[in-house]
Image (spheres, grey):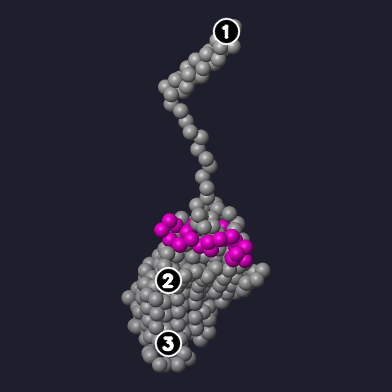
Amino acid sequence: MGNVDCQRRRRVRRCAAVVLVAFALPAGAFAQTVSIEPGARWSVGDGVVDLDCAAVNVAGALDAQDGRVDGIGDLDIAGQVTATTAALEVGGNWNNHGSFLAGSGTVRLSDRCDQAAASIRGTTTFSTLRIDSARAKAYRFEAGTTQSVAQALQLTGAAGQYLAIGSTQAGTRAGLALSTGGTQQIAWVNVADMAAPEGSAWLAPGRPEDFHSVDSGNNLRWFQTAEPAQPAQVPTTSGGALLVLLLGLGLLGRHRLRRQLTP
C-alpha cells in the first residue's frame, strides 16, 4: 500500500476520493474502518477529509500536516500520528499506544457518531484538547494514566446537559494535566475520580457552581484553590518531660496545701 497524499489546494471531494482508492475501500465504506498498515503513510496536506464515522486504525503513519480530518469514529494509534497544525475530530474512543506528535494541532472529541460514551486510553500529550457535548456524553479517562495538555483545554457541556468526565475505574483516579501556562475553559461538567497532578494547573479553580458544574467526588486539585486544610496536630510530650511536669504540679499542690494548713 503506497502513500496517500491529499495535495495542496485540492477540493475536499477529490481528496477523499484519493483516500478511497489508496485504502481499497468499497463505496460507502467510510461507515466501516480505515486501516493504515505498517509501512504505509497517509499525508493529508492542507486538505479536508470527512470519514463519516469510520474507525481509523493507524499501524503505519498518519501525517495530518496542516489539514483537517473530521468524522473519525474510534481512533486506534499503534503507529504514529503527526498533527503539525492540523485539526482532528473524533466521535468515538481515543486509544493511543503508539506515538502522537501534537505540534500545535487541535484534537476535538465531540458528539459526532452518536455514541453515548467514549474512553481515552493510553498516554497522550495534546497541544489543544477540546471535549464538548450538547447531550450529556460521558468520557472516561483510563485509570492510573495521565493525559497532558500543553496549550489549551476546553471541557464544555450544555445547560442541564452535563459533560461527564471520569475514570474508567470507579474509585481510582485518572490524571488530566494542563501546563501552568495553558488556558482552560470549563463549564457544565460533572467530574468524578479525576486528578490534576502536582506541577500542573488547577482545573476549574473555585466552587463547582462557578462553572455550572458538579463535583461528584474523589477529585484532586479540581474545584478548589488550595489544598484541603489538615487537621490540627495535638502536641505530644516526651516521657521525661511529662515526669518533670507531674513532679512540678505535685510540689505546687503540696506548697499550697501547707499554706492552707499553717495558722
Q: In the drawing, does residue 261 fall left or right of residue 148?
A: right
Residue 165 found in image quarter: bottom right
Furthest-right residue in view? Answer: 160
Sequence-first tag of 3 and 1: 3
Res. 103 image quadrant:
bottom left
Query: Taking 238 as reference, is 16 above or below it?
Result: below
What's the CA distance linking mark 3 and mark 2? 24 Å
Q: Which residue is mark 3?
A: 47
Magenta span covers which residues?
189-213
Instruction: Name which residue type carries label 3.
Output: Gly
Amino acid under disc 1: Thr
Name which residue lies at 48% across and 19% down.
248
Q: Which residue is mark 1?
A: 262
Circle 3 or circle 2, nearest the eye = 2
Q: Position of residue 130 (x, y in %)?
A: 50, 72
Specify few, some or many for label 3: CA neighbours under 10 Å numbering under 14, 14-19, or 20 or more: many
Does residue 31 show up magenta in the picture?
A: no
Residue displayed at 54% across by 57% down = 224
Q: Position of 133 compared to 150: left or right? A: right
Label annotation for residue 151: 2
Using the numbered discs, state the Cα–Cα distance from disc 1 to disc 2 in whole angstroms.
83 Å
Q: Main secondary structure of the magenta part?
A: loop
Give above or below for 230 relative to 54: above
Q: In front of the other: label 3 or label 1?
A: 1
Instruction: Name which quarter of the figure residue 24 lies in.
Output: bottom left
**Mark 3 secondary-structure assignment:** loop
For marks 3 and 2, the one nearer the N-term is 3
CB atoms at circles 1 and 2 under 8 Å apart? Answer: no
Query: What element does badge 1 sit on?
Result: loop
Do residues under tags 3 and 2 come within 8 Å of each other at their CB atoms?
Answer: no
Report the quarter where the C terminus lies: top right
Q: Secondary structure at mark 2?
A: strand
